[in-house]
Image (tube, helix red, strand yellow):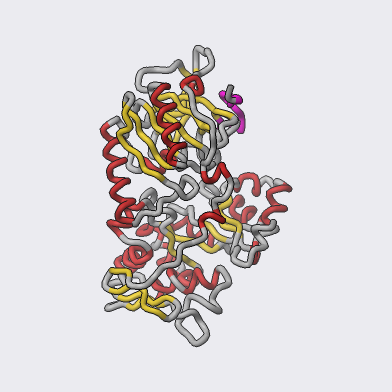
Amino acid sequence: AKALAHPRALAVGEVTRWPDAWRGDAELLRRLGLAPGGRVEGHTAGASGEKISAIAAAGFTSDHEPITAQEVLDRARQGIAVMLRDSSLRPDLVGLLDALKTAPALASRLMLTNDGSMPAFLRTHGFIDHLIRVALDRGVAPIDAYRMATLNPATYYGLDADLGGIAPGRYADLCVLDDLAEPRPSTVIARGKVVATGGLLVGRVAEPPWRRVFSSPEACLTVRWRARSDDFELPGRARYPVIELVSAVISRLQERPMQPGDLHAALLDRAGRWVAPGVVAGFADRIDGFATTTSTDFNILALGRRREAMARAVNRLLDLHGGIVLVEGERIVYELALPLGGIMTRASVEDAARSEDELRRQLADRGYAHHEPLYSLFFMAADFLPTVRLSPRGVWDVKRTRVLLPSRRRR
């Protein structure tokens, strides 16, 4: 409640557990009622029909999960503002824009988002300019394409008195274009001063107060515990609930003995209090040890076929205060420090993209066959996505809401 009362809080962020809202969960509805300005960002993948009506009635005001034009229309007709997505994981914008053919007036209710695209995607395609370019190429009128990237979001968030338009009294934050057909700005003006021109930064960008944002020992990973190989031991069983990746982010459950090519997996508490062991298939079968803090629940994910290498990867991760580490035998073959909460780098987009390129190469060499490894890792502990995930409770059956293999306290 304190965070939501902050003057810069604009909404309750992406609420993933829409089935709880649909069922009328009292505690969730109470929390949604605290939303600043009544705005609740939704994650309503899979919702349809009367469920969308119930979600809208529960207070959800926007959604970025539609993957078809019909899903855009279904949500818009229930009063939900729709963010059209084109990302490194889901490049759906071309098809989503077809909703405007059915309902041209929707241009005033739609926004554009890249939904957390990875650095290599941004380097190749661009950021919001890429989304506008896709819309223009699809035949969207320039006034509507630019409006979906500027005025519409400002209006949705109640910021249009300051942002989203060029008028007296608004912030002088402007992108100067050489041609409406090319949305890449030639000059960028922030607060009335030129800060970039010709693709080069010429003004100073203030550093956010990261030490205030990430202040606890767990957030900074200034912790004193060390991982051991026995952290990754599995209980004696004939069969395990194996998490099999069938795409970059979708998993299915296999109840079977551990097989060649399977990896030991574990979610570890940042403070070192507990570990949730498991088995993963379909990620990469030749990884000795791997660890990362890029996880939806912000704990530590470890994978590997050798428990000693997994412990080495986790311990190097702790030394870095967060990031990504790949170990082969006793040797660290890849590492990326993410000192800002274990989830962000201070490096430029270009440098981050090069690090991502190298990680992709290392994982592909070890058997990774999907298209978005960082999202595979990020969502391994996303206990709101189908079908089975790691969680602080243990291996979690998402659909049946039950623990298949429990977590345990570390010895």
Horizontal side, residue 138 vs residue 32: left or right? left
**Which is nearer the eye, 408 or 206?**
206
Report if residue 202 is visible in the image: yes
Question: Does 403 lie within the magenta span?
Answer: yes
144 or 215: nearer the viewer: 215
Q: Quadrant of residue 375?
A: top left
Q: Is residue 132 magenta?
A: no
Magenta-tinted stretch: 396-409
Q: In which quadrant of the rendered image does the N terminus lie?
A: bottom right
Visible residue check, residue 391: no
Q: For residue 398, what is the image quadrant?
A: top right
User: On the rendered structure, is 28 left or right of 97?
Assistant: right
Residue 87 screen position, x and y as percent: 38, 54
For the point 67% across and 45% down, the residue is: 23
Q: Residue furthest bottom?
A: 168
How would you classify the magenta stretch by its main secondary structure?
strand
